[in-house]
Image (cartoon, rainbow, N blue to C red):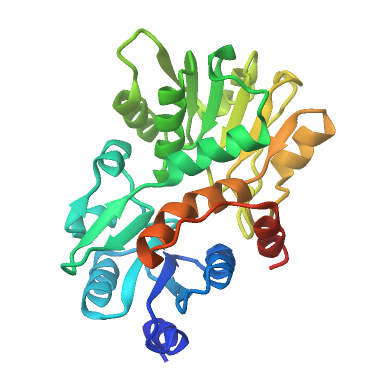
């Protein structure tokens, strides 16, 4: 059976959505949406759909969502958040500004709209996990320049961070991202060299890893935290494993740490409410259920 056939068999004619990525086996999105489905008594399904990273595969995904009557949409994870955009019928202005889509909503007329809930999810998880952190307190370091980084940078700029140091293995991508979000009020986005990433931690109030480094089956993030103040918050949006080497090292030296599960939980609210028509909240019980997977 193809992955599409497996998903349809799992749905059994019920309304469904899914997480789309390559790979996608690690995703905990089915657990978090499954919790809400059960909590609200919704007779629906949320599954996994591996889709290869090429235009033909994305076109097939779009055609499948449009032609399948009980399909409600999908979430997108690496590496599809940017590449999916040309194939959708409409991009929500917030997602257009971020330049990435993580949620696809099938509208009543059958068209597909791309939205982005990563910015909301990131900031909600940050405020929940580190209520003492203040955007205006000082510089922030962001590692990475992909689709998730765009949402993180957007949310931090909007929150009022005075200086953002953006560092990526491919400096050109960081430069393009920095130019896209540089505020017009004199605040700065500094593009720094990858080989100087450890030095750029000096004086930071927040360090955010948006790269895949440290994720299961990926190389670890090589980063010396010596210059990072122990008062800084360290946020790694990777959630498999939940305790990445970066978070373990930061926690050992006394930094407040935020794992990627909170962002995952909060960003899921937008899609669920649109697909299944129920307003949902993130709870400690839900986090425990997802962690158990």
Q: Position of residue 209 (x, y in %)?
A: 57, 38
Q: Position of residue 218 (x, y in %)?
A: 60, 55
Q: Residue at (67%, 31%) from the top-left corner?
A: 130
Image quadrant where one finds the N terminus: bottom left
Residue sticking out furthest to the top: 186
Q: Position of residue 279 (x, y in %)?
A: 46, 56
In terms of image quadrants, where is residue 5? bottom left
Image quadrant where one finds the C terminus: bottom right
In terms of image quadrants, where is residue 133? top right
Residue 138 makes an appearance in the image:
no
Residue 133 makes an appearance in the image:
yes
In terms of image quadrants, where is residue 197? top right
The reply, left or right, for residue 252 in relation to residue 69 is right
Q: Residue at (42%, 89%) from the top-left corner?
A: 12
Q: Nearer the viewer, residue 272 or 57?
A: 272
The reply, left or right, for residue 213 in relation to residue 10 is right
Q: Residue at (32%, 59%) from the top-left corner?
A: 104
Vertical side of 257 occupied by 92: above or below: below
């Amino acid at each position: 059976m193809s992955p599409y056939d497996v998903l349809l068999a799992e749905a059994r004619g019920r309304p469904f959505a899914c997480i789309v990525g390559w790979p996608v086996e690690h995703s905990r999105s089915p657990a978090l949406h499954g919790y809400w489905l059960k909590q609200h008594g919704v007779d629906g399904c949320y599954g996994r759909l591996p889709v290869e990273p090429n235009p033909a595969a994305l076109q097939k995904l779009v055609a499948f969502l449009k032609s399948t009557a009980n399909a409600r949409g999908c979430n997108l994870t690496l590496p599809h958040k940017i590449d999916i955009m040309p194939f959708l019928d409409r991009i929500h202005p917030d997602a257009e500004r971020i330049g990435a889509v993580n949620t696809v909503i099938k509208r009543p007329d059958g068209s597909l709209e791309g939205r982005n809930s990563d910015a909301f999810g990131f900031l909600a998880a940050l405020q929940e996990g580190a209520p003492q952190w203040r955007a205006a307190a000082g510089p922030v370091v962001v590692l990475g320049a992909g689709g998730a980084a765009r949402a993180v940078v957007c949310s931090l700029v909007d929150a009022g961070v005075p200086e953002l140091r953006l560092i990526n293995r491919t400096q050109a991508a960081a430069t393009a991202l920095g130019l896209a979000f540089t505020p017009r009020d004199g605040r700065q986005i500094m593009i720094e060299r990858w080989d100087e990433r450890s030095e750029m931690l000096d004086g930071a109030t927040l360090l955010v890893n948006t790269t895949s480094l440290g994720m299961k089956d990926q190389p670890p993030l090589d980063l010396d935290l010596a210059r990072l103040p122990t008062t800084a918050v360290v946020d790694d949006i990777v959630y498999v494993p939940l305790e990445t080497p970066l978070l373990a090292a930061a926690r050992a030296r006394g930094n407040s740490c935020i794992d990627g599960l909170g962002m995952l939980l909060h960003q899921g609210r937008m899609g669920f409410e649109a697909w299944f028509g129920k307003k949902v909240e993130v709870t400690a019980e839900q986090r425990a259920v997802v962690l158990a997977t």
